Amino acid sequence: MAKLHRFSRTEILLGSEGVAHLEGASVIIFGLGGVGSYSAEALCRAGIGRLLLVDFDDICLTNVNRQIHAMEGNIGRAKAEAMAERLRLINPSAEIVPLKEFYCAENSAELLCERIDYVVDAIDHFTSKVHLLKSCRQRGLAVISSMGAAMKLDPTLVRVADIAQTSRCRMARSVRKLLRKEGIEEGIKVVYSLEEFRQPLLDGGCKSDCICPNKDEQRFSCEHRRVVLGSISYLPAIFGMTMAGEVVRDLLLKK
């Protein structure tokens, strides 16, 4: 009988070579919110040996409804650090690299200079998102991108497709338009939902102040944001898990 270890059940499915291949892979995750945090954990539990976690934000009380690291004791901590701590407990043998950075044109080359086998894009900032996707194309990096998981409820309508084939997703429509300006029409794998955008039932602003360590006075009202969208616990998680599944399957195909 094979020796039991942390990934014994995975080895039954993938074989020892498959497990070894994932252990040798390096994946970078941009954005550790509701989508990215679940994707990072799924990749770690799949046995990916090296994970780079990029997010500038800190954990807010309002993240609790959808982000895997958001819980009592973590409010106010850097998302990258909290996620790295969690993943090291899952797989102490993995190399986990937390980077408290906001991806942009200025630091793109530095963040993408490492050996990377796959890029997970869970950024919700349009300018940064499009720049990252363009940079991955230019560098020949495999990438999967999350489209809009907010204001959705139906888990059965989540899909994977080339961005050129997406429909009914507001974010995908905007990203397609921005990518076309960069000369990119297709060739970007995305996770999106066919569900129509639901209209908010309440004002998105906080009724009371939230703790926000990124602000000078440590407190602010979410009303300063242009748009605050609603979300549910499982939809961003399904997006993130789906992205992780696509990464693992693609890496194994390259074995």
Image: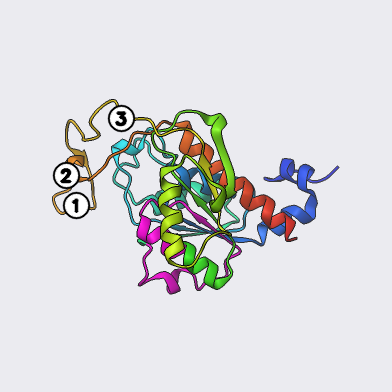
Mark seen at residue 215:
1
Report the residue that reaches farthest toward the top.
201
| Residue 147 in sight in this render | yes
Q: At numbered mark 3, what does the secondary structure look like: helix, strand or loop?
A: loop
* Classed neighbour count for the residue bearing mark 2: other residues with Cα under 10 Å, few (<14), some (14–19), many (≥20): few
Residue 100 falls left or right of residue 134? left
Residue 85 inside the magenta-drawn segment: no
Q: CA gap, disc 2 to disc 1?
A: 7 Å
Residue bounds of the magenta highlight: 103-132
Circle 2 sits on which residue?
Answer: 219
Q: Nearer the viewer, mark 3 or mark 2?
A: 3
Residue 117 inside the magenta-drawn segment: yes
Give the image location of residue 127, x and y in percent: 36, 60
Q: Name which residue type carries label 2.
A: Arg
Give the image location of residue 47, x and y in percent: 64, 51
Q: Nearer the viewer, mark 3 or mark 1?
A: 3
Q: At numbered mark 1, what does the secondary structure look like: helix, strand or loop?
A: loop
Report the residue that reaches farthest toward the left.
217
Above or below residue 225? Residue 125 is below
Residue 16 falls left or right of residue 120? right
Which residue is pictured at 61% across the width and 64% down the height? 117
Quarter the N terminus occupies: top right
Of the residues under marks 3 and 1, which one precedes in the sequence? 3
Quarter of the image holding residue 198?
top left
Q: CA gap, disc 3 to disc 2?
A: 25 Å
* Classed neighbour count for the residue bearing mark 1: other residues with Cα under 10 Å, few (<14), some (14–19), many (≥20): few
Circle 3 sits on which residue?
Answer: 200
Which residue is pictured at 55% across the width and 37% down the height? 158
Which residue is pictured at 38% across the width and 71% down the height? 107
Q: Name which residue type carries label 1.
A: Lys
